[in-house]
Amino acid sequence: MISEGFINAPKAVLQALVESALVGKSQDNTRLIRSFASTEEYIAVLLELDLIAEVVAENPQGKFYNLNELFDKVNHEYFAASLAKPRLAWSRVNTYRKFGHYESARDRIVMSLTLDDAKVPGFVVEFVLYHELLHKYHGTKWVKGRRMVHTKEFRISENQFKSYNEASRWLDKLTRIEKPDLSLGKNLI
């Protein structure tokens, strides 16, 4: 399977995709594919498809937390209100390993439904949102052909979150429990 963003890709990019699938990855093909995947054309196709299909029901209002409100708070507090708001959505399922992700091509942050719970402190949800916004803020760096998203600069910024240690402990505990009893959270701080 390949991303729909390649639908209008030049013949050379499509050939690189086919060769990668059939023969295996090569440095030249990987470079060509990644280069196209970072173009405005690729991003525009994904955004257009999202507008047509709306695969993920994007609703920033959860049962307990509103991602629009949290974005405004985090953006003001940590980015001097300088970040443009990405599209914000809750996932459709609970996850216990990955609590959020930023899709740069779609300028969308999807937060795990696990965090939309009254027993999860607001600062934990804010931290995950902040982490994902740092991906938007710092972008992706390529070092020797490798994609780097958690750079030294990223980690320095991440550590500036005022409740970094407490939020990290909360998330660490959630990853260790298959289906956590969120009331345990008060023991993590």
Image (cartoon, rainbow, N blue to C red):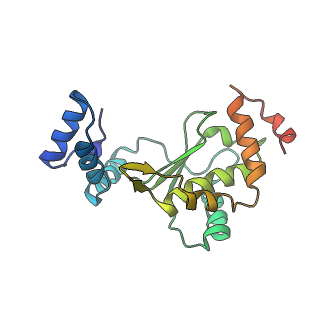
Q: Quadrant of residue 158?
A: bottom right
| Residue 125 location (% of width, % of height) | 68, 50
Quadrant where the C terminus lies? top right
Quick check: 72 left or right of 148?
Answer: right
Quick check: 110 left or right of 103?
Answer: right
In the image as oriented, which residue stretches furthest toward the top?
178
Q: Nearer the viewer, residue 170 or 120?
A: 170
Vertical order, 176 against 78 (above or below): above
Residue at image position (64%, 53%) is 66
Quick check: 129 left or right of 51?
Answer: right
Q: Nearer the viewer, residue 31 or 88?
A: 31
Quadrant where the N terminus lies? top left
Q: How many marks?
A: 0
Residue at image position (31%, 41%) is 3
| Residue 109 location (% of width, % of height) | 52, 51
Vertical order, 171 against 82 (above or below): above
Q: Quadrant of residue 18?
A: top left
In the image as oriented, which residue stretches furthest toward the front?
144
Quick check: 1 left or right of 8?
Answer: right
